[in-house]
Image (tube, rainbow, N blue to C red):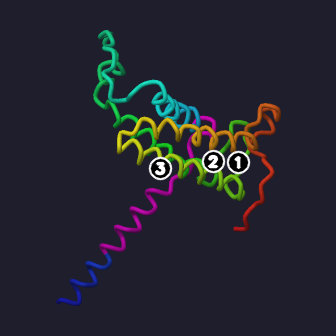
């Protein structure tokens, strides 16, 4: 009886973990540009704003216009907004490095290139450092780290998004492809 119960428990645990694992392995839906515009751009700007505005300072009240955005704009405020922005930037690497992620021009994002992986790691590292500084509510430190954040963006953009390349050549880069 105990052996049967143990086997049943093991099967249940194994089946549950397999189901949970495959549930996370979904194919990419959006393009790299959409991920950049929807996640990286707005959240980076939240962090850049700390150079000029203390996140702990009271915000100006927006007039009630009935929109959901304005109705719920004050739920998450202050340093929590900066913390969340930094975390989503750090987590963003798992989205941009997802195999099969298309670029806006139809090419696949170069997720197997050494330099691409290095650039996404730089973004994760600086975002984590910003998160730590935000937890300490250290506006000066976050402000200093925005230089590293801008550099992490620029390092990748110089290679993979250069406007000199033109849209059709984006996502090509010159990195070394890692073997499978």
Q: Is residue 31 left or right of residue 39?
A: right
Sequence-first tag of 2 and 3: 2
**Residue 80 location, x and y as percent?**
34, 37
Sequence-first tag of 2 and 1: 2
Front one among 23 and 159: 159
Query: Label 1: few (<14), some or many (≥20) within 10 Å?
Result: some
Q: CA distance from mark 2 to mark 3?
A: 24 Å
SS class of the residue under badge 1? loop
Seen as rendered, the residue at the extreme front is 140
Q: CA distance from mark 1 to mark 3?
A: 27 Å
Q: CA distance from mark 2 to mark 1?
A: 6 Å
Q: How many dots with numbers? A: 3
Residue where numbered disc 3 is placed: 128
Residue where numbered disc 2 is placed: 101
Compared with residue 53, is residue 38 higher up or lower down, i.e. above or below? below
Query: Label 2: few (<14), some or many (≥20) within 10 Å?
Result: many
Residue where numbered disc 1 is placed: 108
In the image, what residue occupies the spot 68% across and 52% down? 116
Check if mark 2's residue and mark 1's residue have beta carbons within 8 Å.
Answer: yes
SS class of the residue under badge 2? loop
Quarter holding the N terminus?
bottom left
Q: Is residue 56 left or right of residue 120?
A: left
Compared with residue 68, is residue 17 higher up or lower down, i.e. above or below? below
In the image, what residue occupies the spot 41% across and 68% down? 18
**Residue 16 location, x and y as percent?**
34, 67
Compared with residue 122, is residue 63 higher up or lower down, i.e. above or below? above
18 in magenta:
yes
Quarter holding the C terminus?
bottom right
């Amino acid at each position: 009886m105990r052996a049967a119960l143990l086997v049943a428990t093991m099967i249940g645990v194994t089946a549950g973990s397999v189901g949970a694992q495959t549930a996370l392995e979904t194919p990419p839906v959006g393009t790299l540009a959409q991920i950049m515009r929807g996640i990286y751009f707005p959240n980076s700007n939240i962090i850049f704003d700390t150079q000029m505005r203390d996140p702990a300072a009271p915000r100006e009240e927006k007039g009630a216009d009935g929109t959901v955005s304005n109705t719920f704009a004050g739920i998450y405020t202050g340093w929590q907004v900066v913390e969340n922005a930094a975390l989503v930037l750090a987590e963003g690497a798992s989205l941009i490095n997802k195999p099969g992620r298309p670029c806006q021009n139809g090419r696949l994002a170069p997720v197997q290139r050494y330099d691409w992986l290095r650039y996404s790691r730089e973004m994760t590292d600086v975002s984590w450092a910003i998160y730590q500084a935000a937890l300490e509510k250290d506006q000066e430190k976050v402000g200093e780290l925005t230089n590293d954040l801008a550099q992490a963006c620029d390092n990748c953009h110089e290679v993979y998004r250069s406007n000199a390349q033109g849209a059709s050549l984006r996502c090509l880069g010159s990195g070394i492809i890692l073997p499978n």
